[in-house]
Amino acid sequence: MGRPKGAKDKKQRSYTVSSKAIAQRRNNSALLPAETDEEKAYNSRMIQHLLEIQKIAANADRHDVLSLKSCFIAYLELCQQDGFKVGNLAAYSAMGMSKVDWFNFSKKDDPEIKRFCALVQQTCAIARETSIAESKLNPVIGIFWQRNFDGLRNDTEQVQAINEQEDDYSSGSSYKDKYRNLIGSGDKG
């Protein structure tokens, strides 16, 4: 960790954290056990939901798109019944797949599979967008999910990418080389 900024004495190497910051870090841990009846009830509901997702996945056949569609619809109905939000990873799991399995599956050169994968992605994206728009999902988390699952990017990143793709035309020869065939074949330089 090193010494605090500006400290010149080697004795000042220790890193200190306020007791308030330590308490906050403890409260931010996702591994704390449920303590209140409300937390225990939510934890129980969530675990039951996860178990039901695994039951749906038991019927999944990766070689049969109709089977996968059936599992996906069953997952959506489960979310509706249990009051849980729709999510990509849970949807993949309901179809017996991990994120990596889904990625590989979606890259298959089969139009029916591509259409189905687009349907799943679009359905999850719409659910996410609606949750953000209706203030049911923190926009920061929603944007993170949209960037990671929906392929959305900020305009500044797109402009930046375009700028990075542009060649260096500081010398006239590189510009001329790129557009040589437009100038004409009779051009000698």
Image (spheres, grey):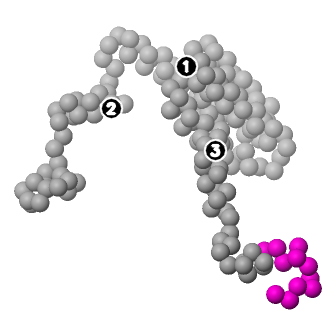
User: The disc labelled 3 sits on which kind of residue?
Assistant: Asp
- Which residue is nearer to you in this view: 111 or 153? 153
Q: CA distance from mark 2 to mark 1?
A: 25 Å
> Vertically, is 125 above or below 151?
above
Q: Is residue 140 visible to the viewer in this orientation of the structure?
A: yes
The residue depicted at 29 percent of the width and 28 percent of the height is 27
> The C terminus appears in which quarter of the rendering?
bottom right
Identify residue for label 3: 155
**Mark 1 secondary-structure assignment:** loop
Which of the 4 image quarters holds residue 74?
Answer: top right
Q: CA distance from mark 1 to mark 3?
A: 23 Å
Which of the 4 image quarters holds residue 174?
Answer: bottom right
| Marks 2, 3: nearer the viewer | 3
Q: Which of the marked residues, 2 or 1, is nearer the chain's N terminus? A: 2
- Which residue is nearer to you in this view: 181 or 30? 181
| Magenta stretch encompasses residue 180 | yes
Report the side of 127 relative to 66 (left or right).
left
Q: Residues within 10 Å of mark 3 (few under 14, many from 20)?
A: few
User: The disc labelled 1 sits on which kind of residue?
Assistant: Ser
Mark 2 near mark 1, Cβ–Cβ under 8 Å? no
Which of the 4 image quarters holds residue 72?
Answer: top right
User: The disc labelled 2 sits on which kind of residue?
Assistant: Ser
Q: Which region shows up in magenta?
A: 178-189
The residue depicted at 21 percent of the width and 34 percent of the height is 22
Image disc number at residue 29:
2
Mark 1 near mark 3, Cβ–Cβ under 8 Å? no
Q: Is residue 51 visible to the viewer in this orientation of the structure?
A: no
Image disc number at residue 135:
1
